[in-house]
Image: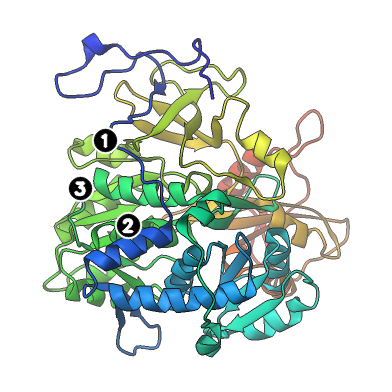
Amino acid sequence: MPHDPAADPIANPAAAPRGHAPLLTASYRPADTAAPLYRHTVGQLLRTTAARRPEAIALTGIPDDGSGPRRWTYAELLAEAESIAAGIRERVPLGGRVAVWAPSVPEWPLVEYAAALAGVTLVTLNPTLRAGELTHALGVSETEMLIHADRSRAYDMAAVVSGAAASLPRLRHIVSLSDWEELRGGAALPAEDDIAAARVPAQLQFTSGTTGAPKAVLLSHRSVLNVSRLTFEALRVRDTAEVVSPLPMFHTAGCVISCLGPLWSGGTFTLMERFDPKVLLEVLRRTPGAVLTSVPTVLAALNEAARGAPGLPPLSAVLTGAAPVRAQLIAETEELFSTTVFNLYGQTELASVLTLTRPDDPLELKTTTVGRPLPHVECKIVHPGSGRVQPLGVTGEICARGYQQMVAYYGDPGASARKVDADGWLHTGDLGSMDATGTLRLEGRRSDLIIRGGENISPVSIEDVLTALPGVKEAVVVGLPDEVWGQVVAAVLQTEPGAAVDLEDVVALCAERLSPYKIPVHWFTARDLPLTASGKIQRFRVLELAVEGAFRRLGGAEGEAL
């Protein structure tokens, strides 16, 4: 797409220190295109790496039941993925969609690789989805084949699938992970050129938008592969490094950065089925020098488990992001594990990473910024109203343009056009500022999304459930600050005159209709809600009043400040 010359100021080469990129004169950073981009598929990279390091350990799964790790070499991983890919091809045509709904078991990345080899798009689903949420996701994505776990701890996933299947006519194939052998097949796999010619996206990921309806984000093979590669290269992660991930696979942080990052160097991907700080600490003890991928909530819990523990393992690097990262948390992690913490920023629509801090950044930048953009992406800060590039250091909306941005919101051209403008710039909805080196500082969010431990939560989807309650006139959901989670969900209910709300009944209803992480942990009632002159609810003021204790806590007393 062509640039707007007035909106894209050029750098000032004379002001740049020797050996560094030119200093900027406004909040626009051009793309660094020095390194070439990889233009093949996830499946092709797996084949290349397996041919180069067939006997190296590629995948280690850490089960949730306390049993021993499960391991695959690269040769075994490729053979297993090709067998499952052949079974997928017997059921789903080139370019079709195959969903995986399971916790982070090692079969998850096996299905990810199999989908790539089969030339289908992998639909990634949160294993905590409730029946209505699962049905919506499968319907919106037009999934043709579902591969699912039977249970996730106490959650009967098989029963949910059985109930949802009848309302999804496009969903023609359902296979449980417990019937793994049934997934195998003998169909011929498509050639690399055939997948490329059909422009088959690698993944369809769901995210929550400001309207409340989860959007289906299509990501290309080129985006997920190069983001993982360029992230690890920027951090100077050593070849064949082991990457330990306690993150859920349905997130790009899990299935893109953590999974595909070590694939580039023939390293090991160690996947924890479920995060437990004590178990994670033991895994890290067995893998000194590993790279840990995390979110701030994980780091805080890990550090708590590690304080006072003897013989803590050194780590090569710690990657974190998806929520604001406190400087104190970074400093403590670095001291405990003799490591460097790198702060990342991005979103699903950018295949998860836009910017990151670098090994040679000074301490102040590592602890107060989200670093500089990855290669091959332009970045600018614009005035939210006019769209013009802001002066250096002035807050505006963060926008990006490059190979890694989403293909589209599947089935929603209107939302796609609102997200990516006519010049190809993706509008993140986040506010930030840029300095002369292109380093970004986050200043807040334009949207009302709540970020709880790295999870993006749409208030509207929760409000829709709450306003259906008898006696509730209005419901406003906001994110209250929390030292552990970053933000937690809080609900303010405005009731009809004379109506009473039973907290136990409300929570029980939420448990039926919402994923656990969406259920509010703070509940308030209000006689009136702050409104604008046009009658719209002032969400920022609702948040302020909740923090100040101006609302009555449901089950508590008036005026309880947080």
**Residue visible at 28% across and 61% down?**
292
Label 1 or label 3, whichever lies nearer to me, is: 3
What is the x, y in percent for residue 290? 21, 64
Q: Name the residue under label 2.
A: 261
Q: Name the residue under label 3.
A: 236
Crowdedness near tag 3: few (<14), some (14–19) or many (≥20) residues, C-alpha within 10 Å: few
**Residue visible at 21% across and 72% down?**
56
Crowdedness near tag 1: few (<14), some (14–19) or many (≥20) residues, C-alpha within 10 Å: some
Question: In which quadrant of the rendered view does residue 59 lie?
Answer: bottom left
SS at mark 3 in the image? loop
What is the x, y in percent for residue 504? 70, 75
* Residue 365, label in figure: 1
* Residue 266 against residue 219 in the figure, above or below: below
* Residue 76 against residue 181 in the figure, above or below: above
Q: Quadrant of the N terminus?
A: top right
Q: Which comes sooner in the sequence, label 3 or label 2? A: 3
SS at mark 2 in the image? helix
Q: Mark 1 is on which residue type? A: Leu
* Residue 177, label in figure: none
**Cα distance between the residues tagged 2 and 1:** 24 Å
Crowdedness near tag 2: few (<14), some (14–19) or many (≥20) residues, C-alpha within 10 Å: many
Taking 377 as reference, is 122 left or right? right
Q: Mark 3 is on which residue type? A: Arg
Q: Mark 2 is on which residue type? A: Gly
SS at mark 1 in the image? helix
Label 2 or label 1, whichever lies nearer to me, is: 2
**Residue visible at 26% across and 18% down?**
22
Question: In which quadrant of the rendered view does residue 33 lie?
Answer: top left
What is the x, y in percent for residue 499? 86, 63
- CB of mark 1 within 8 Å of CB of mark 3? no
